[in-house]
Image: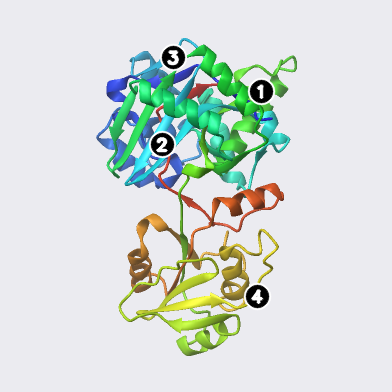
Amino acid sequence: MAIVRPFKGIRPKADLASKVAELPYDVMNREEAKQMGKENPYSFLHISRSEIDLDDSIGSYDEKVYLKAKENLDKMISDGIFSHEKDAIYYIYQQKMEDRVQTGIVACTSIEEYLNDVIKKHEFTRPVKETDRINHFDKCDANTEPVFLTYRSNEEINSIISTWIANHKPEYDFVTEDEITHTLWVLDDKDLNNKIQSIFAGIDYLYIADGHHRTASAVKVGLKRREENPNFTGEEEYNYFLSIIFPDKDLYIMDYNRVVKDLNGLSKEELITKVEENFVVEKAEKGIQFKPSKKHVFGMFLEDEWFKLTAKEGTFDKNDPVERIDAEILQKNLLAPILGIGNPRTDKRIDFVGGIRGLRELEKRVSTDMKIAFSMYPTSIEDLFSIADAGEVMPPKSTWFEPKLRSGLIVHALS
């Protein structure tokens, strides 16, 4: 069963929501965040990236940063920018990107279910990033940003959401600079809330789509507070973390492409000869960027030419949920043995480019700081489910979800 419960959110006034809402903390660097927050005193970056309000000499992980985040959150509440919900409720959050719509429930999910694998993972986390959000959540006494979860679509929940949307005015409705429409409804019907909670109790698993570090950090803050309060009941807010839960049918996963700094000492001709051992190599139509249209096919951009690479039979195990992922096929058959990229998580010779930037960005990188690029076919949500269900881990940088959740629309207090 999945525990998905309503909560008393902390959220901005309706007329300020569009000014408060920001991209997630980890999609920009410090200088970019500072520039974004500079002209906007309402920006949630003053909380999620509070180092922008401190001297540049202070490191991003200094305790002063987390104390500043707490100070800024408290001030926004005392100034009336944010206010506390009176009752524990759900929210409905919808995003529109061009002709695509994803609509989910904003709720709290259980740290216990993360620990016992009802909430399934598919990525490794890095200790330094975990520690950062542990300190941030703990000092703020809040989950300041949501985790992006998904589940196998349920018609009862879909019906409740669509009916509510059709009959109620949204609390927030605005378009951000990236042309994404963000709409939020307050679902303050107690009977419906009870029904939603009951339906989710019959759903076997939830899956982390994006936000593995935020999830792990929220769980560790909860465990820390349990140790500090040995008589905890399990009902305390720190036993739950802020989530937005979308049905799988709504999700859009884009390609997550690769660029490599050099050819590992090979000439263009030598590299292609080696690539031909495991791939069928064809020249793409001249002047046309090659975007793969199916699994196990890759684009390669080298010296102003695009090539189509098709993985040969026998180069991967079709029955293994990890081995059949395109990121793993490319890594094991080309990036590692030919280009010498042993660990893509740590090797500084490789970089990753989200599909939202387009193939022109790959060509640009090859003309500036890189030597070769690879375009990928997007990983499917079914592949993500298969790997998580098997208790395995996705190859790094396998999924790029769009649109990104906006931070600052709902905060979850831990006490």
Task: Tell me the mark number nearer the camera, choosing from 4 and 1.
Answer: 4
Q: Quadrant of the N terminus?
A: top right
Label 3 sits on a secondary structure element that is strand
Label 1 sits on a secondary structure element that is helix
Label 2 sits on a secondary structure element that is helix
Task: Tell me the mark number nearer the camera, choosing from 3 and 4.
Answer: 4
**Image-based side of 239 in relation to 15, left or right:** right
Disc assigned to residue 27: none
Residue type beneath disc 4: Thr
Tell me where residue 344 sits by quadrant.
bottom right
How crowded is the residue under tag 1: few (<14 C-alpha within 10 Å), some, or many (20+)? Answer: some
Disc assigned to residue 315: 4
**Image-based side of 241 in relation to 101, left or right:** right
Residues at marks 3 and 4 touching, judged by CB atoms closer than 8 Å: no
Q: Which residue is mark 3?
A: 84
Q: Earlier in the sequence, mark 3 or mark 1?
A: 3
How crowded is the residue under tag 3: few (<14 C-alpha within 10 Å), some, or many (20+)? Answer: some
Residues at marks 2 and 3 touching, judged by CB atoms closer than 8 Å: no
Locate residue 268, reporting x and y percent.
46, 86
Residue type beneath disc 1: Arg
At 57% from the left edge and 19% from the top edge, which residue is drawn?
195
- The Cα–Cα distance between marks 3 and 4, rounded to whole angstroms, is 56 Å
Give the camera-side residue of 302 and 309: 309
Q: Which residue is mark 1?
A: 225
Task: Tell me the mark number nearer the camera, choosing from 3 and 1.
Answer: 3
Task: Tell me the mark number nearer the camera, choosing from 4 and 2.
Answer: 4
Task: Tell me the mark number nearer the camera, choosing from 2 and 3.
Answer: 3
At 55% from the left edge and 69% from the top edge, which residue is drawn?
296
